Image (tube, rainbow, N blue to C red):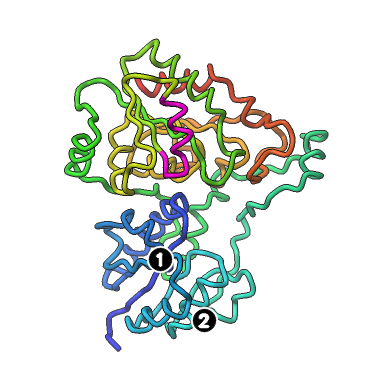
């Protein structure tokens, strides 16, 4: 076995979560300057990690690759240590079957016996459990009993930093960061016809893969866009994945000219570049929200069923980003669909969002 420490990081499966792990990866690289660090990631996220300064190598896998086949690939690389970011049983089984000698991860989902160093959950962690309908109705009747969430200690950035700290990394909060080169932004401008003049380019991301409870109503996106157009000579870029094509198409019909619809048309690296070009992005709480903040672009986000204290963009309290909420006592419920009257999103007014968007553009 090589004397050089060889660390496998088992990455997460969703874009927003992946962006939130970048702080821990950077802190780990600082603590393990001479180690070889390899990230195991779903193939759909592989582009995110191109030339990332914390990593020496990337191993990508497809959704249909079985756990035994993946473990055989990992075993051939002879890693000395595995750090497992997700909490699932399968991810711990992967590295156990790969016979990696030291295996570190959270003790969860009956997988502690697969780990050589099971880590207890942080005391400040707040579970993202779906509220049952009975609890939602109770909170609507007794809003004074809603439990508070600490806006810094509970953020999911800490979830990954705490694991990295078991390797001697600093647990200090730092902002997630994804680097985008000038060559990438220039290529994106050329490919998608985005002007490099002084006109502000504003991103609109109306979808959310998790479900409708995270989506501010589409007609309100259109109303905000109409208000901003009255005051600025902007150009719109519609963003999203393949599942958001319908939302973006409907919105484009409302916006008409000076609009480029890129939903479902960009690679992950191209999405990074387009987000970097934008002056500001109006987005739901979804992967591109985290990505926009990580490439250095301001975001405006209506939050409904989810919690900015847990999964807000960038660093907690970063005033560059505007996170708007209605005073709904049942929020966050973490449900895919609202079981009552959707007051958490309907209570966020078009005027409030347009005002903060205009401030960001000017």
Residue 300's x, y, as percent?
Answer: 46, 30
Is residue 286 covered in magenta?
no
- Give the answer, above or below, for where 325 lies relative to 19: above
- Give the answer, above or below, for where 55 lies relative to 330: below
Is 180 on the left or on the right of 146, as rendered? left
The stretch of residues the image draws in magenta is 240-252
Residue 170's x, y, as percent?
Answer: 41, 60
Residue at image location 46% in from the left, 39% down from the top: 244
Sequence-first tag of 1 and 2: 1
Residue at image location 45% in from the left, 58% down from the top: 171
Residue 39's x, y, as percent?
Answer: 36, 66
- The overriding secondary structure of the stretch rendered in magenta is helix
Locate the C terminus and report the quarter of the image it occupies: top left
> In the rendered image, which residue does mark 2 sit on?
116
Is 23 on the left or on the right of 87, as rendered? left
Residue 176's x, y, as percent?
Answer: 39, 49
SS category of the residue bearing label 2: loop
* Classed neighbour count for the residue bearing mark 2: other residues with Cα under 10 Å, few (<14), some (14–19), many (≥20): some
Label ID, residue 62: 1
Tally of marks? 2
Of residues 237 and 323, the one drawn nearer to the viewer in this rendering: 237
């Amino acid at each position: 076995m090589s004397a050089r420490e060889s660390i496998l990081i088992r990455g997460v499966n969703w874009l927003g979560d992946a962006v939130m792990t970048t702080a821990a990866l950077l802190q780990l690289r600082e603590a393990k300057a001479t180690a070889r660090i390899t990230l195991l990631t779903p193939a759909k996220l592989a582009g995110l990690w191109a030339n990332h300064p914390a990593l020496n190598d990337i191993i990508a896998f497809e959704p249909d690759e079985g756990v035994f086949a993946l473990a055989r690939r990992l075993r051939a690389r002879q890693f000395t240590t595995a750090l497992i970011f997700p909490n699932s049983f399968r991810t711990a089984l992967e590295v156990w079957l790969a016979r990696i000698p030291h295996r570190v991860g959270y003790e969860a989902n009956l997988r502690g016996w697969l780990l050589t160093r099971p880590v207890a959950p942080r005391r400040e962690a707040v579970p993202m459990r779906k509220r049952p309908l009975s609890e939602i109705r109770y909170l609507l009747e007794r809003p004074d009993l809603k439990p508070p969430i600490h806006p810094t200690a509970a953020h999911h950035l800490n979830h990954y930093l705490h694991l990295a700290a078991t390797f001697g990394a600093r647990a200090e909060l730092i902002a997630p960061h994804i680097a985008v080169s000038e060559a990438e932004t220039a290529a994106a401008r050329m490919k998608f016809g985005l002007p490099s003049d002084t006109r502000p380019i504003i991103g609109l991301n109306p979808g959310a893969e998790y479900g409708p409870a995270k989506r501010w109503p589409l007609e309100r996106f259109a109303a905000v866009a109409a208000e901003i157009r009255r005051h600025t000579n902007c150009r719109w870029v519609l963003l999203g994945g393949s599942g958001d094509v319908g939302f973006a198409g409907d919105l484009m019909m409302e916006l008409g000219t000076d609009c480029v619809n890129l939903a479902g048309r960009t690679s992950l690296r191209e999405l990074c570049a387009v987000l970097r070009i934008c002056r500001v992005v109006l987005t739901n709480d979804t992967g591109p929200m985290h990505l926009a903040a990580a490439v250095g672009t301001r975001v405006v986000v209506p939050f409904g069923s989810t919690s900015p204290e847990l999964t807000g963009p960038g660093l907690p309290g970063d005033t560059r980003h505007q996170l708007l909420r209605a005073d709904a006592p049942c929020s966050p419920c973490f449900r895919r669909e609202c079981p009552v009257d959707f007051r958490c999103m309907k209570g966020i007014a078009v005027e409030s969002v347009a005002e903060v968007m205009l401030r960001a553009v000017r």
